[in-house]
Image (tube, grey):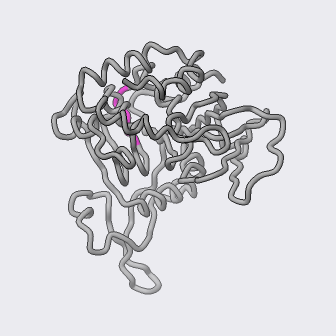
Amino acid sequence: MDLASAVAEHVRDGDVVALEGFTHLIPYAAGHEIIRQGRRDLTLVRMTPDILYDQMIGMGCAKTLKFSWGGNPGVGSLHRLRDAVEQGWPHPLALEEHSHAAMANAYEAGAANLPFAVFRGYVGTDLPKVNDAIRSVTCPFTGEVLTAVPAIRPDVTIIHALKADREGNVLLEGILGVQKEAVLAACRSVVTVEEVVETFGPRSPNAVVLPAWTVDAVVEVPGGAFPSYAHGYYPRDNAFYTAWDAIARDRDRFRAWMQANVLAVGPEAFAVHRLAAGHRVA
């Protein structure tokens, strides 16, 4: 599908939406299309929300953030996220904070169609005091008290990957987060890719192939993870992450940047614009 059609069909107001990627292969193109289409009241889920979720929150897409760490990696705070939490701008944002381990286990439980995840964690921490989704269960075999969290079952998961073949199978290589689990846990899934190929050819030892039956839509979007990186295609634009700090601190400057670099750019010209945008971040 094309990007606009994939988002229009699979992302709906009020959905639980996971856009996953761990430093690598963050689905910026798809997130920007959600912003362009004006989706509202989303529950955004991600292990490590960074600039993309800062943009979506600042543009009013989100009502809730379920996460395990939030920040501009190597730089500092997410100022649009902070503004939403501290000042309610553009509207209030509810938070459900977890550890990385809890999020990863919750995605795995969702992928297995289980109601909750059980693991050893949160001992000696304060998060259970502020998050009533963190509970405990007693092992019926050993009597050990373990932590339980609800499974994550997104309405739609969106990831960026390296390649898809013409049957809809998807190839992920390089640093992987929970993309596989997030897709398997979701009711619907959209995968943007750098290219569509006839065959994947040789693969690295840590390659993951998502079979076509797990994917609802494949969209070819070269540069779709920029300014994060795509292994073997383009590097991370560290200058962009640094520049974002100043852009996001000021509401008017933020809105002007989003207008010029996201809202005014049609999805058909997206790939070319994205790869050049890192040099026009002011």
Q: At x 44% / y 61%, what residue is drawn?
A: 116
Residue segment shown in magenta: 40-44
Q: At x 71% / y 32%, what residue is drawn?
A: 195
What x and y, as percent, mark residue 61? 35, 29
What x and y, as percent, mark residue 176? 58, 53
- 163 on left or right of 24: right
Q: At x 35% / y 57%, what residue is drawn?
A: 98
Is residue 249 one of those drawn in magenta? no
Check the image and name the residue furthest to the bottom: 142
Give the quarter of the figure containing the N terminus. Answer: top right
What x and y, as percent, mark residue 163? 71, 38
Closer to us: 88 or 206: 206
Please say if 232 is above or below 255.
Answer: below
Closer to us: 25 or 110: 25
Give the quarter of the figure containing the C terminus. Answer: top left
Closer to us: 228 or 19: 228
- 71 on left or right of 266: left
Q: At x 23% / y 40%, what residue is drawn?
A: 82
- Magenta segment's dominant SS is strand
What x and y, as percent, mark residue 191? 61, 36
